[in-house]
């Protein structure tokens, strides 16, 4: 409950409510845990319906002007929500804003990036190229590792671990695409917003502490499977030319990558750890 505790420690001055969508309610209820937090509305889902669908259910229970999607393995900082709302009020050309994400040790995380492309297959943060040659041009461009992370800037997409969006834009987009059970739903949302003519902002003046992977550690094999399934879902939705051979080769590449990482996970050597 560190996330909820952080709202007690740094309460926003703007009116707000917290909606918790509990994907684990079938195993153990969170009612007792959230009871000390009077601003919290708890939605107990009958089964784990996935990250995207759970966020959509939570959004349906709130009618505020802004929606702030936040992972449970995060903590907000002082003034986080207030400064993000203020920025969006002053810059209507932006529809989504993401704060700076830092680890518990203070390390700045790569929470904003370029939209993926075919080159991303060899230049993502877990790729052999990136791990062996982190300063190569392709990886640096996709991961945006060389940008100034002290000033707000327009980016392609920001992490769904902490993402604020105007409600009217979220509704126009139809919410998160629930075909993405977990992973890539944030990339898809930002891509669709961009196609709608609005911008995405990386906003380091606000920050959250993010313990990456706390949720996925409970079932690493399922998380790896969903990561790769989402890769193909995103490709098929936005980049496919409906040429069967190209689609098949792309799927084969993603499957082989998934098998490799599942094998590494079984050996305790997966870079996703």
Image (cartoon, grey):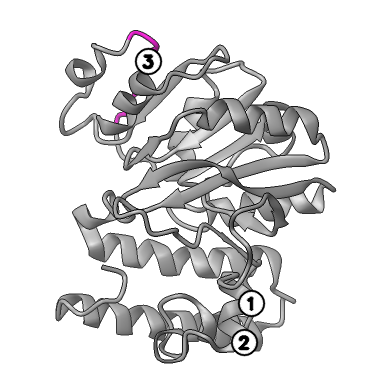
Q: Nearer the viewer, residue 53 or 201?
A: 201
Over which residues does the magenta segment extend?
38-46
Q: Is residue 49 left or right of residue 1?
A: right
For residue 226, the mark is none
Q: Are marks 2 and 3 in contact (CB under 8 Å)?
A: no
For residue 141, the mark is 1
Label tally: 3
Q: Name the residue: 50% across, 19% down.
A: 12
Q: Please state which of the two labelled residues, at mark 2 or mark 3, is closer to the viewer.
A: 2
Name the quadrant containing residue 2: top left
Q: Are marks 3 and 1 in contact (CB under 8 Å)?
A: no
Q: Is residue 81 left or right of residue 90?
A: left
**Residue under pointer 2:** 137
**Residue under pointer 3:** 40
Disc 3 to disc 1, C-alpha distance: 40 Å
Q: Are marks 2 and 1 in contact (CB under 8 Å)?
A: yes
**Does dot 2 land on a helix, a strand or a loop?**
helix
Q: Name the residue: 17% across, 16% down.
A: 32
Q: Name the residue: 43% across, 70% down.
A: 228
- 55 over 141 or under it: above or below: above
Residue 46, image x and y in percent? 30, 29
State yes or no: residue 39 in magenta: yes
């Amino acid at each position: 409950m560190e996330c909820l505790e952080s709202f007690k420690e740094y309460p926003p001055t703007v009116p707000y409510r917290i909606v918790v969508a509990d994907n684990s309610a079938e195993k153990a209820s969170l009612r007792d845990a959230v009871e000390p937090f009077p601003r919290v509305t708890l939605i107990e889902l009958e089964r784990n319906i996935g990250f995207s669908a759970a966020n959509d259910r939570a959004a349906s229970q709130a009618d505020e002007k802004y929606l702030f999607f936040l992972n449970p393995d995060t903590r907000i900082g002082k003034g986080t929500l207030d400064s993000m709302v203020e920025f969006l009020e002053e810059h209507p050309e932006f529809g989504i804003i993401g704060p700076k994400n830092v680890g518990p040790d203070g390390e700045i995380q790569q929470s904003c990036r370029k939209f993926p492309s075919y080159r991303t297959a060899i230049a993502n943060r877990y790729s052999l190229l990136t791990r062996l040659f982190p300063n190569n041009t392709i990886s640096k461009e996709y991961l945006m590792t060389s940008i100034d992370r002290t000033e707000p800037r327009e980016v392609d997409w920001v992490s769904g671990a902490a993402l604020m969006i105007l409600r009217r834009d979220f509704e126009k987009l139809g919410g998160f695409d629930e075909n993405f059970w977990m992973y890539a739903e944030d990339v898809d949302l930002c891509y669709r917003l961009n196609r709608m003519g609005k911008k995405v902002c990386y906003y380091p003046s606000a920050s959250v502490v993010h313990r990456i992977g706390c949720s996925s550690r409970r079932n690493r094999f399922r998380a790896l499977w969903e990561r790769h399934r989402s890769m193909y879902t995103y490709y098929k939705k936005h980049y496919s030319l409906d040429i069967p051979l190209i689609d098949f080769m792309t799927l084969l590449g993603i499957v082989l990558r998934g098998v490799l990482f599942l094998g590494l996970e079984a050996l305790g050597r997966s870079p996703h750890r």
